[in-house]
Image (cartoon, coloured by chain):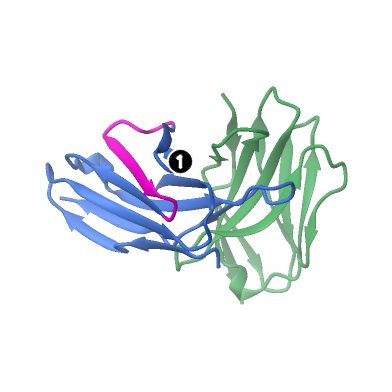
Amino acid sequence: DAGITQSPRHKVTETGTPVTLRCHQTENHRYMYWYRQDPGHGLRLIHYSYGVKDTDKGEVSDGYSVSRSKTEDFLLTLESATSSQTSVYFCAIRRTGNMNTEAFFGQGTRLTVV
Amino acid sequence: AQTVTQSQPEMSVQEAETVTLSCTYDTSESDYYLFWYKQPPSRQMILVIRQEAYKQQNATENRFSVNFQKAAKSFSLKISDSQLGDAAMYFCAYRQQGAQKLVFGQGTRLTINP
């Protein structure tokens, strides 16, 4: 357990509405990530953060924004949700150090845009 | 760009038997990490095993072991003495040394037959 909590766990929203997903960590890790999981694609990186107010884009960032005002919270916002953003969203953290190179994931959020 | 390919969308094995899941990757880098993640029906992403590219010795974790062939860019996962709890989606993933992004394969769904 890497102390990662995602909220909400499930959400159904209408096309065109804004949606914010929250990732909260309890272990003060520097690196945090948002991935989306879709059938046939595995997981793909949306955005990541390497510190408070330090974020960067991943490979599928269009239509998403992120914010990190505190070390423990990393928010993913869909400004105007579209059906193509129906997916399972995972937050992850990465511990830094010589041996700790893997990512640890939250439980995922299933988002359905209708 | 790096890519990871899992050519077996589905695999099945009898309980107590051995099964091997295939993964190939494409990179021009020499320093990187490879991972196998397990995703059971609970949706949680669980790290199974990790391999550093600079290590020639294949990683093992109890019943899980890998066959890492760097020249062939192959990273297969062997599960010995398969158990019902091993049933899950398995993802192979790659991360370049110094990079943030994990690149995932499409996943292999493993079924264990009692």
Foreground residue among A60 and A54:
A54
Chain part drawn in magenta: A59-72
Q: Is residue B20 left or right of residue B60?
A: left
The residue that label 1 is drawn on is A49
> Is there any visible trace of residue A39 in the rendered image?
no
Rendered view: A56 above or below B80: above
Visual hue assigned to chain B: green
Say which amino acid is labelled 1.
Ser
Quadrant of the rendered image containing residue B104: top right
Q: In which quarter of the image is residue B75?
A: top right
State the residue at coordinates (69%, 22%): B28
The answer to whether residue A68 is magenta is yes
Q: Quadrant of the N terminus of chain A?
A: bottom right
Give the answer, above or below, for where B90 lies relative to A50.
Answer: below
Q: Is residue A26 magenta?
A: no
Residue A100, horizontal then vertical, whole percent: 68, 51
Q: Where is residue B77 in the image (x, y as percent from the top left)?
A: 71, 52
